[in-house]
Image (cartoon, helix red, strand yellow):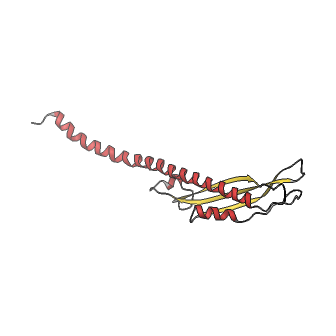
Amino acid sequence: MPRAGARRRVAGRGQVLIEVLLILPVFLFVVFTIMEIGFLAFHTILLHHAAYEAARIASLTASATASPGCTAPALSGAYQDVVAKMFKTGATAVAHGPIPTMSDPQEGCMNYDVAVTVSRRIPMVFPLTGFVLGNTPDRRARVIQATVRMPIERPLFK
């Protein structure tokens, strides 16, 4: 005749299996979401760095005239080469400017800024995390953007 404790142990094994099967998908979803947020954070930092470098190149290569000229500078397309070298595919860079900021009281000329926006589509790595983190219509990717504004330097002398 089996004891009552032995019967309880056999019945408890099935209960543990059911509890694990109920909790495991939720636990894995939370773990995958945390890992996906880290993946997106890495790409966001990379995108901000690319936008900073593109804005720096755009501000340095703008054709600003030397003093005493007060014409607005013209932007070149050199900033797009920087973004193309950092990201082989999938990144777009758009420069806005020249944006007038404030007048220089000594010279009487307006100062200008350039703003560069870089955007990129980042595909989701883990299954089901796109339902929470994705922002595209198919929910399988997230489009992230970074905008950096930088002053356009004018040379002092010709």
Frontmost residue, 39 versus 34: 39
Q: Quadrant of residue 85?
A: bottom right
Residue at x 33% of width, y 43% of height: 19
Q: Nearer the viewer, residue 125 or 132?
A: 125
The residue closer to the viewer here, 105 or 29, is: 105
The residue positioned 64% from the left and 65% from the top of the image is 81
Left or right of residue 3, residue 54 in this image:
right
- Left or right: residue 150 versus residue 157 is left
Residue 73 image offset from top left, x and y in percent: 81, 61
Q: Residue reaching furthest front?
A: 158
Number of labels in the image equals: 0
Q: Nearer the viewer, residue 80 or 106?
A: 106
Quarter of the figure with the N terminus: top left
Expressed as whole percent of the image width and height from the top left, the position of residue 67 reads 87, 56
Q: Is residue 130 left or right of residue 57?
A: left
Locate the C terminus and report the quarter of the image it occupies: bottom right
Q: Give the x, y percent position of residue 114.
A: 75, 56
- Seen in the image, is 20 located left or right of residue 76? left
* Residue drawn 21% across the image and 38% down it: 9
Q: Position of residue 29 (x, y in %)?
A: 43, 49
